[in-house]
Amino acid sequence: MRNNTQTNRRSFLKQLSAAGVGAWTFSYVSPGSVFGAEANSKLNIALLGCGNRMGQLLPSILDPGENVVALCEVNASRIGQLQKEAAKHGAAGAAMQNAKVYDDYRKLLATERSVDAVVIASGQRWHVPMSKAALHAGKHVFCEKPLAHSVAEAREIRELARGSKLVTQVGTQGGSSATFRRSMEVIQAGVLGPIRDVHCWINRSFPPSAPIATEADPIPEGLNWDFWCGPSRLLPFKKYYLGGCLAWGRWLAFGDGHLADMGAHAINLPWRALQLGPPQHVTVKIAEPLRDSYPSVTDFRWDFAARGQFAPVTVWWHDGVEAGPPEEMGKELLSTYDKVPTNGVLFAGEAGLLYSDAWGVGGMVKLKGEPDCKAVLQHAGCKTVPATLPRAPKNHMQEWLDACKGGPGTFQGFVSSADIAEVAMVGMVALRYGKPIEWDSQNMKATGEPGADRLINLAQRKKWL
């Protein structure tokens, strides 16, 4: 993609200011290299990780006609599967059959100089290493959630993105919905009054925490298992690791369970709407002793200090088959729903509540004295709240594609998304350390707990980095 026209940077930034960008916590990256890019030009894109999630992202890349010129995957069988799926998507999908194929992301980035941008949908352990490499190579980056696998990784990618002119976006697609952004506006306008508690949950459950298997299954032909493990420990191969994020994500060597998987979505809305910043105190309750995998039931609690107009607040994450908000809070939803929803985010304010699903979508408001919840886009008590946030184009990927070509900035770039990831990863430090921690964000330490340092900055194998 070449820049052939000149856009007035000053008028563009003035337009952003008029949209109320200064009133909220999103990181806009305005790459000097993309100002002036033709709005209808096509990007040359490389795909890193070609499994199930990339297949789900593929239509939003190919349907606009972008050029997928390179693919990278350590499991050879997945390349053909992805190309077969691509063939269903017109000319761009047909052209993808000619994309260059690599089994090493480093070789791809060093060789494919025409690539403008990369989409990363590998496992959580790979997200920061691949994103770092792509940014250092001068590529715009869309990375699936969870963004980071440790607090130190979250800090590292945040600082790298902060100093970059490249466009980034994390795959928390709920944030691009109109209801997510309207819920932010309503909460920040004070419609619910002071908010002291936010409960996030999903009723998914893993088996009880278990040790890593020591007996290996045969490694499938075409799979580079050592590279698949990458920066994480090289474990004996088990076929159940290959079942996607709900398979490998159970094992702490590779991921951080439901908190990282769905918490990346659920914590997004409260962090942004309440301008949370880092937590001060973190506690975790689990259903059984922690071994090498995520527990069957968790209750995480983060306590945040007062911030500007916002009161101190406690944010909770609950998972397990019976997960949900406290019973009395859940009863407030029963007049609208037959039962407490199986996932959600519930803001408890002194003047009322706001409920969304765990992706932050479909906000519903119920003020004190009202019998039922009403949609945040139609609720009478919300109608006078001005729209201060820009609305996204037709989908989350399109917002990133447009930004790569010089359009308005992404809503969920790496700078703010890394701070949200840090909240979850501090929770994982408390879980793995086995006791509550006081979080010293400035020094990236658990106060008075030097034994937690190894969990804040997880050891990584350097062989594949």
Image (tube, rainbow, N blue to C red):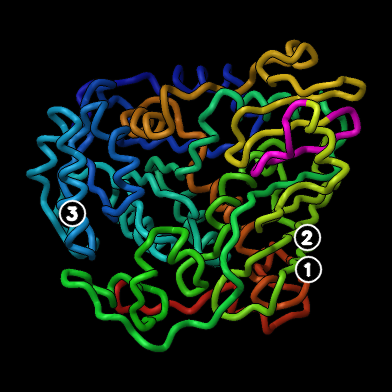
- SS type, badge 1: strand
- Taking depth in this image into account, of 384 and 254 the one nearest to the observer is 254
Picture quarter with the N terminus: top left
Q: Which mark is first along the chain, 3 or 1? A: 3
Residue 69 lies in what quarter of the image? top left
At label 1, the amino acid type is Glu
- Residue furthest to the left in view is 98
| Residue 59 visible at all | yes
Q: Position of residue 29 (x, y in %)?
A: 45, 38
Q: Position of residue 358 (x, y in %)?
A: 62, 41
Residue at the spot of label 3: 79
At label 3, the amino acid type is Ile
- Taking depth in this image into account, of 178 and 458 the one nearest to the observer is 178
Decide: marks 3, 2 in contact (CB < 8 A)? no
Residue 196 lies in what quarter of the image? top right
At label 2, the amino acid type is Gln
Relative side of 253 to 200, left or right = left
Q: Which mark is first along the chain, 2 or 1? A: 2
